[in-house]
Image (cartoon, rainbow, N blue to C red):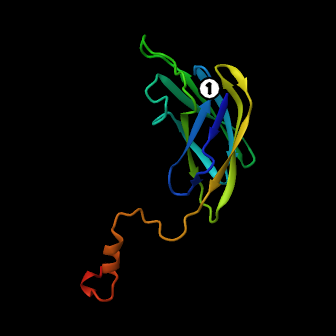
Amino acid sequence: FNIDINANLFYSPSIDNIIEVFAEKFDILNSIDIEFYYDSSLINITNFSIYETELASFDYDIEFSELIEDGIFKGKKMSLFFNPHLNSSEAFIPNGKVNIFNIVIEILDINSNSNSKIYAKNIRLNELIVSDVDWDILIEVPKGCTDNGNIDPDKWALIYDPGHPENYP
């Protein structure tokens, strides 16, 4: 069993950041339990989801709870399990490397680019113990204009162009 994230992505403050978690080399998914630990001065895990993953159309539930804090490190335990609501439901059988769940993180108010880690410990796949892993989280603080693009830059240029005083706000 192998579990990993896309380590080439950058995460930024002020938006919900989605970390896609991928898994491979397993036969069937009945359940997975993981304890996540992270530096709470930089990031906060706010949710876990199977929305827009390979499991979205299957009968899985996902739950999480807080673990005891240890200094700046915080922990959350996530449990994902097959919970058939219909008699014809089947558990997920993967075909290669697949996105099985997402972690939603909030980047806290920081002023410069940084690196952090998320530690995945006490992993159990289908009640069997799996090796712990840790993932690097690259945090990038946007520089310059962070306008979400609601207005065309050409319109901004006209509004503030000294040659067009009729456009001034």
For the point 38% across and 64% down, which residue is it?
A: 149
Percent of width and height locating residue 152: 33, 68
State the image quarter where residue 56 is shown. Answer: top left
Mark 1, other Cα within 10 Å: few <14 / some 14–19 / many ≥20? some
Q: Residue furthest left?
A: 166
Identity of the residue drawn at 56% across and 50% down: 106
Q: In the rendering, at what x and y percent does residue 82 appear?
A: 53, 20
Instruction: Please give left or right for residue 141 compared with residue 83 in the image.
Output: right
Q: Quadrant of residue 114?
A: bottom right
Q: Residue furthest top?
A: 87
Q: How many marks?
A: 1
Rendered location of residue 69, percent (x, y):
71, 42
Which type of secondary structure does the marked residue at label 1 adopt? strand
Q: For residue 30, what is the image quadrant?
A: top right
Q: Tell me: residue 19, above or below residue 2.
A: below
Tell me which residue sits at (57%, 47%) in the image.
105
Residue sitting farthest toward the front: 96
Q: Quadrant of the N terminus?
A: top right
Which residue reaches farthest bottom? 163
Q: Which residue is mark 1?
A: 32
The C terminus sits in image quarter: bottom left
Of the residues shown, which amino acid type is indicated by label 1?
Answer: Ile
Horizontal and vertical percent position of residue 22? 59, 36
Foreground: 20 or 69? 20
Q: Is residue 58 above or below residue 99?
A: above
Nearer the observer, 162 or 94: 94
